[in-house]
């Protein structure tokens, strides 16, 4: 190892051709293994052959491959032929790759001909992605500094050749530098799909990971109650809170800070030590007023393209982060993103202070500023919840954590992260998050099951929520369940004008969220009537082929004439749904569930838990929901059933309880329209509460058929 590090230093100091010497250094031991992993094995001899294949690429050469070794070989081949390799994900579609490459422009002050260069793209979180260009020399200085520090800290002997673990995307600098470090040491890269494999089965000397992967590793080790097979992990952008738990599992973490513009890691803690982050060799940091600092040294990129304009780095780069540099030992403490400061109503809010209060390390968070007419900006927290926790329960937990902050610092909105198809690049941009916030506010929702499975849009009833449907979804895990909070039940009701507008917005929201492929609809009671409204909309817009199956539970068809509708609206308006005290609400619920339609519900064991569940459900907009979506607000759907029977080819089913005489009478109307009907004996209106297992098993038969 020492000989290779010395060779890198000689190459960088030599006046001769650095590129040729770089290739000679990396390819000097053809029988050694360069890559081992899910794609098999690639030796350095094979790598040499791949780099010598004929090259007919353009100057700007897109490098994208699902095979890390072939990806690296294509990059080397482009360099050898005087091209500019641009590192891209093989998962990007052609249009997105073209858009990225078009951010570059060939202008006079671009350093063509002076350097062998490699281009890598930033995520574009705050705007158009930047194409950052690194010279080969800068990358070699980078590798030399990192490996020199690691040899010192990990006490590697001069003749030792380490193995490196690859689990990061290789088109990002974190993953690419793993391949480059191995190449200049003639070492082996071991590639796995899941970071936990390095902890449970596969030993490497150093694996590079991100914080979410360390979370996965710690969870896996907790389950297996064993020490990690691999000890040393370089963790990008992690907080020191990981260290105590990691040490107990035999993990030795180095927590690092870096930027794409600096070729990755700038400073890191010593492996396994709770020490300040020291800059790696060949990186220089300089403090400036107001906790700003600059980075310089030979590892700095040559510059970057953005919107076809070349921005050279000359001398030093102002870090996008706030940080404190210790004047005694030069160590760096990061305070937070400089461009992430949120100014809300004149108050400065540091996102890292908010994120530090959140207790769940098994979740992913993004805190960002969103525009607000009154306050200028507001903090909004986006999250992917922990497994086995619903969105609503997760938000409750987050709100509890945030109580330790002054109220002005707490996020004004807490929203689940957008589905992956909303994300066009590496990470969501500000524009994507802003649009997603608008979309999500239309209908907040939960989703369960298999995201790749057939879609079921499920609509709960009055006073309910997605939790009412969760027990049914457990019986059909192969489907992807999308369950919105209906207006007035978790989704703000102010945006809805009337019943028709409600089901129109609901259908539009769903089709924007999941624009591809057919879907099924399951609706209960009020949710069933909204489902019929959606079906009516599909019929009138010639989209009924998008509806696979329609399952209605205890669903009325509506009233036959305007006089009955008016009477029902008056009855709904007189419901006293504004409760001053919890006991007032309890009394209302007990009276509500005494109606004949509920059968023997009050005598069942689940009655008490149902009351407690409804007591815990926010009720502030129940009254408005009833006024907009009660049965007095739309005409009968009998005509819709007739059209459905003629045009719909999928399965249609109506389920009801034998003791629910009010809704049992609709079964004949549904049968005439070609619906399968199912009567559940000795049950009332609350089918999902009284017999979730029987109902789930029946729906298994219907939907799987």
Image: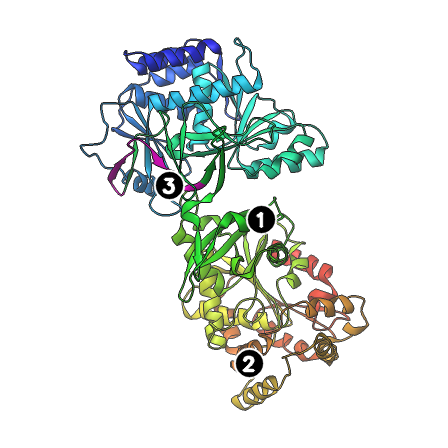
Q: Position of residue 658 (x, y in %)?
A: 73, 73
Residue wearing tag 3 = 93
As drawn, 72 above or below 88? above
Task: Name the front one of labels 2 and 3.
Answer: 2
- Callout 2 crowding tier (Cα within 10 Å): few <14, some 14–19, many ≥20: many
Please give the range of residues in magenta: 307-322
Q: Position of residue 411 (x, y in %)?
A: 52, 58
Residue wearing tag 1 = 450
Residue wearing tag 2 = 627
Q: Which mark is residue 639?
A: none
- Callout 1 crowding tier (Cα within 10 Å): few <14, some 14–19, many ≥20: some
Name the residue: 48% across, 77% down: 498
Query: Which of the image's four quarters has the C terminus?
Result: bottom right
Considering every residue shown, the one lying at the far front of the view is 328
Q: Nearer the viewer, residue 344 or 401?
A: 344
579 horizontally vs 136: left or right: right
């Amino acid at each position: 190892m020492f000989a290779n590090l010395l060779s890198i230093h000689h190459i960088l100091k030599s006046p001769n051709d650095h590129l040729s010497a770089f290739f000679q250094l990396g390819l000097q031991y053809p029988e050694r293994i360069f890559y081992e992993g899910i794609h098999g094995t690639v030796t350095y001899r094979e790598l040499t052959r791949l780099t010598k294949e004929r090259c007919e690429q353009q100057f700007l050469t897109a490098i994208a491959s699902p095979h890390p070794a072939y990806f690296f070989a294509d990059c080397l081949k482009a360099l050898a032929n005087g091209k500019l390799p641009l590192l891209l994900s093989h998962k990007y579609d052609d249009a997105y790759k073209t858009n990225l490459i078009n951010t570059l422009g060939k202008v006079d002050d671009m350093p063509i001909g002076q350097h062998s260069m490699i281009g890598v793209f930033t995520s574009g979180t705050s705007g158009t992605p930047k194409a950052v260009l690194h010279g080969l020399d800068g990358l070699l200085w980078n590798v030399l500094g990192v490996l020199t520090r690691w040899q010192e800290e990990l006490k590697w002997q001069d003749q030792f050749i380490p193995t490196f673990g690859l689990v990061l995307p290789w088109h990002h600098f974190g993953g690419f530098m793993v391949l480059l470090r191995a190449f200049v040491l003639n070492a082996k890269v071991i590639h796995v799909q899941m970071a936990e494999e390095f902890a449970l089965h596969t030993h490497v000397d150093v694996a590079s990971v991100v914080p979410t992967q360390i979370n996965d590793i710690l969870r896996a080790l907790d389950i297996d109650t064993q020490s990690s097979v691999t000890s040393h992990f370089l963790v990008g952008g992690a907080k020191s809170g990981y260290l105590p738990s990691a040490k107990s599992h035999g993990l030795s973490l180095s927590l690092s800070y870096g930027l794409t513009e600096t070729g990755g890691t700038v400073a890191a803690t010593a492996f396994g030590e709770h020490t300040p982050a020291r800059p790696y060799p060949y990186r220089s940091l300089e403090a400036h007023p107001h906790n700003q600092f600059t980075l310089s040294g030979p590892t700095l990129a040559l510059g970057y393209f953005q919107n076809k304009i070349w921005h050279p780095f000359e001398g030093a780069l102002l870090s996008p982060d706030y940080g404190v540099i210790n004047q005694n030992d030069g160590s760096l403490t990061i305070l937070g993103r400089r461009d992430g400061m949120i100014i809300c109503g004149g108050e400065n809010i540091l996102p890292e202070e908010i994120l530090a209060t959140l207790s769940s390390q098994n979740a992913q968070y993004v805190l960002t500023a969103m525009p607000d007419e009154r306050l200028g900006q507001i903090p909004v927290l986006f999250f992917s919840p922990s497994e086995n926790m619903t969105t609503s329960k997760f938000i409750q937990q987050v709100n509890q954590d945030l109580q330790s902050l002054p109220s002005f610092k707490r996020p004004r909105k807490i929203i689940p992260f957008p589905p992956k198809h909303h994300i066009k690049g590496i990470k969501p941009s500000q524009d994507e998050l802003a649009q997603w916030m608008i979309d999500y506010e239309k209908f907040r929702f939960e989703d369960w099951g298999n995201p790749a499975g057939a879609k079921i849009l499920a609509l709960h009833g009055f006073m309910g929520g997605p939790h009412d449907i969760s027990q049914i979804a457990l019986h059909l895990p192969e489907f992807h369940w999308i369950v919105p909070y209906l207006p007035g039940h978790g989704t703000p009701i102010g945006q809805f004008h009337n019943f028709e507008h409600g089901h129109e917005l609901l259908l539009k929201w769903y089709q924007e969220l999941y624009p591809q492929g057919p879907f099924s609809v399951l609706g209960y009671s009020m949710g069933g009537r909204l489902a019929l409204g959606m079906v009516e909309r599909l019929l009138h817009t010639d989209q009924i082929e998008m509806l696979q199956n329609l399952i209605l539970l205890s669903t009325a068809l509506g009233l036959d004439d305007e006089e009955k509708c008016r009477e029902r609206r008056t009855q709904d308006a007189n419901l006293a749904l504004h409760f001053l005290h919890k006991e007032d609400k309890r009394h209302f619920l007990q009276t509500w569930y005494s109606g004949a339609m509920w059968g023997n519900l009050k005598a069942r064991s689940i009655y008490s838990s149902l009351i407690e569940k409804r007591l815990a459900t926010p009720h502030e907009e129940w009254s408005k929901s009833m006024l907009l979506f009660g049965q007095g607000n739309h005409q009968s759907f009998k005509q819709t059933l007739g059209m459905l029977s003629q045009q719909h080819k999928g399965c249609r089913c109506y389920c009801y309880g034998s003791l629910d005489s009010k809704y049992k009478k609709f079964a004949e109307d549904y049968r005439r329209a070609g619906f399968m009907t199912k009567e559940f004996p000795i049950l009332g209106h609350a089918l999902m509460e009284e017999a979730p297992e029987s109902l789930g098993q029946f729906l298994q038969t219907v939907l799987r058929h």
